[in-house]
Image (tube, grey):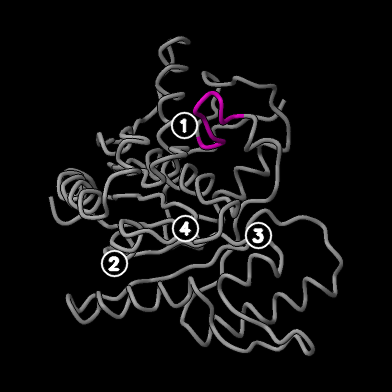
Amino acid sequence: MGQASVIVVGNEKGGAGKSTIAIHIATALLHGGANVAVLDLDLRQQTLGRFFANRKAWLAANGAEAPMPLEHAISSAGDALAKAPDAEQLARFEEAFAEMSGKADFVLIDTPGSDTAISRAAHGKADLIVTPMNDSFVDFDMLGQVDPVTLELKRHSLYSETVWGCRKSRALATGRQTDWVVLRNRLAPTEARNRKRLDERVEALSRKVGFRVGPGLRDRVIYRELFPFGLTVADLSPSIRPVAMSLQHVAARQELRALMGALGFTGLDDSEKIAAE
């Protein structure tokens, strides 16, 4: 097996939907037949790790089958590793990454909503960085700063600077480029003028620092209600239906397909498994 493709889901602002996006990318890749390894570097929260623990328990209790990723012990280290010195965290991460990248087609890494040593190390290994951003200037502020009077884009901000540095270092060290996609996530009906303003600033910043803009996932109850079971809309089928089905589930499935297409993954959805009732 060749070297795995590395996908890092990152944003230094919490609450942007990183773990939700990571969960859906992982399950979509799994259903496409890929061998996926996951590393949860949000050592305290452990949302990604807990999701797949829920998945394993629900499938066993219901006699159902669905693809599972490869996981490493670092994803269950919890508070103990979070309190360890940076050097120890980095050593554990490098060990986990080396092991997982030799076994999988994709290594998907979920990062914390803060600037940490292992988060930077992960970004430095990424073939693809995926950054979810809520539809507001509050979230945009982590990527770019605007003039408070004119709202014109002034400069890139903290997280953009982090990604820029990691991409540059990787290119110099390996000659490999890192793709960066910013997802407009959790879109909800908002005042049209404010959305237009934000759209213009995002596009301007994308040209300045070099990211692509793609569609994320809307703020749907559907995505939240499946989390306790460790399932996503990619898993729903005649044999896996923990909730009542509706046309909203079909729409969510289409949304996930659009997200994967924007990231450059095609041919991952082998059948339309949801039949609306």
6 to 192, vertically: above or below: above
Measure the C-alpha gap from mark 3 to mark 2.
Answer: 24 Å
Quarter of the image where one finds residue 162: bottom left
Give the numbered dot on residue 218: none
Task: Tell me if mark 1 has few (under 14), some (14-19) or many (20+) residues whose alpha carbon lies within 10 angstroms of its own.
Answer: some
Q: Residue at x 16, y 47 (%)?
A: 95
Quarter of the image where one finds residue 3: bottom left
Query: What is the secondary structure assignment of the residue under circle 1?
Result: helix
Query: What is the secondary structure assignment of the residue under circle 2?
Result: loop
Query: In which quadrant of the rendered image does the C terminus lie?
Result: top right
Give the residue number, with chain letter if any, for mark 4. Answer: 114
Q: Main secondary structure of the magenta part?
A: loop
Q: Position of residue 199 (x, y in %)?
A: 70, 76
Please tell me which of labels 4 and 2 falls first in the chain: 4
Measure the C-alpha gap from mark 2 to mark 1.
Answer: 26 Å
Measure the C-alpha gap from mark 4 to mark 1.
Answer: 21 Å
Query: What is the secondary structure assignment of the residue under circle 3?
Result: strand
Q: How many marks?
A: 4
Give the numbered dot on residue 51: 1
Residue type at mark 2: give it.
Gly
Q: Nearer the viewer, mark 4 or mark 3?
A: 4
Q: Kindly indicate whether the residue at mark 1 contacts the one at mark 2 (C-beta within 8 angstroms).
A: no
Q: Position of residue 242 (x, y in %)?
A: 60, 19
Please tell me which of labels 3 and 2 falls first in the chain: 2
Give the residue number, with chain letter if any, for mark 2. Answer: 124
Measure the C-alpha gap from mark 1 to mark 3.
Answer: 22 Å
Q: Nearer the viewer, mark 4 or mark 1?
A: 4
Give the numbered dot on residue 134: 3
Please tell me which of labels 1 and 3 falls first in the chain: 1
Q: In terms of depth relative to the viewer, which is nearer, 255 or 213?
A: 213
